Amino acid sequence: MTSRDNERVVLARDLVGTPEPDDFRYELCERPVVGPGQMLVEAEWLSLDPYVRALLSGRHFLRQPRAGDVLPARSVARVVDSRHAVFSIGDRVVLETGLQRRTVSNGDDAWLLHPGHSPASTALGILGMPGMTAYFGMLDVAQLKAGDTVLVSAASGPVGSMVGQIARIKGARAIGIAGGPHKCTWTVREARFDACIDYKNESVDQRLRELAPRGVDIYFDNTGGEILNTVVMGRHLAMHGRVILCGLITQYNLKDAPNGPNLGPLMACRGKILPMVVYDYENRREEFLRAAIPWFESGQLAYREDVAEGLDNAAAQFCKLMRGENFGKTLVRLL
Ligand SMILES: NC(=O)c1ccc[n+]([C@@H]2O[C@H](COP(=O)([O-])OP(=O)(O)OC[C@H]3O[C@@H](n4cnc5c(N)ncnc54)[C@H](OP(=O)(O)O)[C@@H]3O)[C@@H](O)[C@H]2O)c1
């Protein structure tokens, strides 16, 4: 006897280029059964993240999903059945469920939703993994100082918007780079960046000469590609400037990685390129929340969400993210 009251999104075929909705399949499937030491959770919010595209090409250290596999996703979920020692029915947890409604978990990668995660979806965005990436990327890796000029690409997204807002909170200057006037206006008006360059309609090189004539102290790179090239090759790094390599979204849809830029100008400015990997900071999540939740509750952090309703719309929403058309943290709501 089986019941088909679960739903999920699986990879339909190996991906080539920019994802299309047909690359994924929405399915009804059996409700999983809880075993000893396990819990059954029902997702309320599912996170769609750019790294999943790199994962689907086998360009990530996590296992490459194959046709028929559920797409990876972190979620905010409620425990609806439990034979687990720690997690009880009614608990709200954050964990990796994949893009599906109901999941059985042994709880190894789960943690209780913090009361400061209000609304709960922030646990997947500005107060979640993307926010942590910005926080440790800026304070630990980039060694942000008051008075620094900080430049960040994909500035209206959850990582980029948090980078600029942390810069402002810590007494630095924040310049964003984002695609289109709507994203740039939000970045300046709501996230209170000092300026934002619309790379689709303006010359990044020329605008940086106007906005940061003495160079930027930190370039937080979420894109790679032409923007990274312009910042380094255009000699926009200040003396001892730091480039934080955080994301390469310009490459995720490409079959082969393009030839890298010649980074000779780094020598002239004694600049540093430093990698940021958020997984290295998982054991410091509490430290992040102790700092970020008071900022959030006191109204110092603006954020945007780009929400699709229902799992049957999740694949189209992921494709929108990978075309760069999302505006804010990309989510699927199952409530
Ligand atoms: N290192 C880590 O541990 C870590 C952790 C989390 C995220 N990341 C990386 O951080 C970056 C931002 O992540 P997020 O979650 O905050 O995503 P996001 O900003 O919500 O979404 C991606 C944004 O990137 C921009 N974009 C997409 N395609 C582009 C292209 N071809 N060229 C230039 N820009 C493009 C688009 O904004 P515009 O319209 O403004 O261009 C799009 O809205 C991603 O590269 C992600 O992989 C790294």
Image: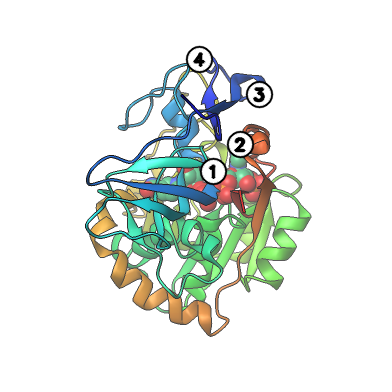
Location of residue 106 (image quadrant): top left
Gap in angstroms between the C-alphas marked 4 and 1: 18 Å
Residue under label 2 = 318
Can you identify the residue that label 4 sits on?
14
The residue that appears at 23% across and 43% down in the rendered structure is: 36
Q: Which residue is mark 1?
A: 48
In terms of sequence position, does the residue under pointer 3 or pointer 2 come before the other?
Answer: 3
Q: Is residue 306 left or right of residue 222?
A: right
- Secondary element at image label 4: loop
Q: Position of residue 241 (x, y in %)?
A: 38, 59
**Along the polypeptide, which appears first: circle 3 or circle 1?**
3
Q: Residue at x 66, y 23 (%)?
A: 20
Hey, what amino acid is under mark 4? Answer: Asp
Question: Residue 18 at what x, y percent from top left?
Answer: 61, 25
How busy is the neighbourhood of tag 4: few (under 14 within 10 Å), some, or many (20 plus)?
few
Q: 257 or 296, which lies in front? A: 296
Cα separation, mark 2 vs mark 4, equals 15 Å
Q: Which residue is mark 3?
A: 20
The answer to whether any part of residue 275 appears in the image is no
Quadrant in the rendering for residue 239: bottom left
Amino acid tagged 2: Phe
Name the residue located 35 percent from the left edge and 77 percent from the top edge: 290
Mark carried by residue 34: none
- At mark 3, the secondary structure is loop
